[in-house]
Image: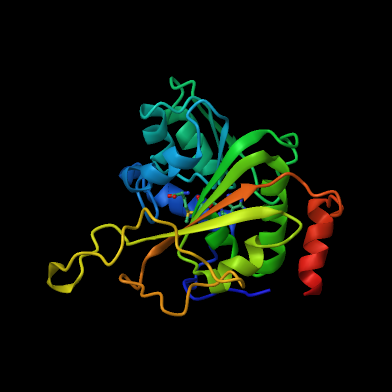
Amino acid sequence: MFRDVSACSTYNYADALYWDARYIQEVEFGSFDWYQRYSALRPFIRKYIHPNSRVLMIGCGNAVISEDMVKDGFEDIMNIDISSVAIEMMKKKYESVPQLKYMQMDVRDMSLFPDDMFESVIDKGTLDSLMCGTEAPLSASQMLGEVSRLLKPGGVYMLITYGDPNVRMPHINRPVYNWKIELYIIPRPGFQKPGGAPPLRSHLDPIPLTEKGLLPADYVMEDPESHFIYVCKKLAVPTDLPSKSADSLANDAMRR
Ligand SMILES: C[S@@+](CC[C@H](N)C(=O)[O-])C[C@H]1O[C@@H](n2cnc3c(N)ncnc32)[C@H](O)[C@@H]1O
């Protein structure tokens, strides 16, 4: 398995204490959305996630995406984060919004939730944080095993990340999850091509992946700091694959 440290700073983004301290420090700023705001993600979210369905937002931080989704008609969003500071702030902020629920929880162990509980799981920057930790492959495998367990068949895990297919597909494209994966690539907010030239293609179109799950050799990334949206649809469990616990998935990952 790859350990992707390309965008990890010296901070430990996988450490709850780091995030608690950061959210205390940033309390005066109120909220911050990593990578992209809902307005840019809306076409993808509305395409794959029904507003009446049960959504799990993992590593919600103090982002406003869940609030924006509720304003857009979403009815049931469970938000979790490892930082108790972020969760307490968000609980208070949204105490009068019944569509939004907040719980402090580690994505690597979401055993409080039963199997198949959610139609969708949204992850904006949380797998990325785990990939910066010391036990990155193990953490990623524990988290993705839990995501897979919580998704209903036909449900969708939407991963919004800076990680390109080289570093993310080895983690998400595993037979045991049985996910059908589509990839979109969107420029970072405010990106302009030099000279204001028009984009080569619409970023609303999925990028065809090679058989190995990589970008086509002739693919040109217009914004080198683009964000990647992996839409992972959980297919029905095939009968020849044993159903595995998060622990045994993690052990498999460590053996690689
Ligand atoms: C890069 S921030 C993204 C926050 C938010 N999703 C957004 O888009 O702005 C990563 C978030 O993941 C949370 N996080 C890190 N490790 C976690 C874990 N093991 N379980 C749950 N949340 C975690 C952090 O507390 C932080 O809020």
- Image coords of residue 143 (percent x, y): 67, 54
Q: In what quadrant of the picture does the C terminus appear?
A: bottom right
In the depicted view, which residue is nearer to us: 27 or 43?
43
Q: Is residue 169 visible?
A: yes
In the depicted view, which residue is nearer to us: 143 or 211?
211
Q: Is residue 16 left or right of residue 251?
A: left
Q: In what quadrant of the picture does the N terminus appear?
A: bottom right
The answer to whether 41 is drawn above or below residue 249 in the figure is: above
Residue depicted at 47% across the width and 29% down the height: 51
Q: Is residue 49 left or right of residue 191?
A: right
The answer to whether 33 is drawn above or below residue 141 in the figure is: above
Q: What's the colour scheme?
A: rainbow
The tally of labels here is 0
Q: Residue furthest left?
A: 195
- Image coords of residue 208 (percent x, y): 49, 64
Residue depicted at 49% across the width and 71% down the height: 8
Residue depicted at 74% across the width and 60% down the height: 175
- Image coords of residue 195 (percent x, y): 12, 72
The answer to whether 140 is drawn above or below residue 123 in the figure is: below
Q: Quadrant of residue 192?
A: bottom left
The answer to whether 197 is drawn above or below residue 233 in the figure is: below
In the depicted view, which residue is nearer to us: 38 or 137?
38
Q: Is residue 63 left or right of residue 118?
A: left
Q: Is residue 135 visible?
A: no
Residue depicted at 43% across the width and 38% down the height: 46
- Image coords of residue 54 (percent x, y): 57, 30
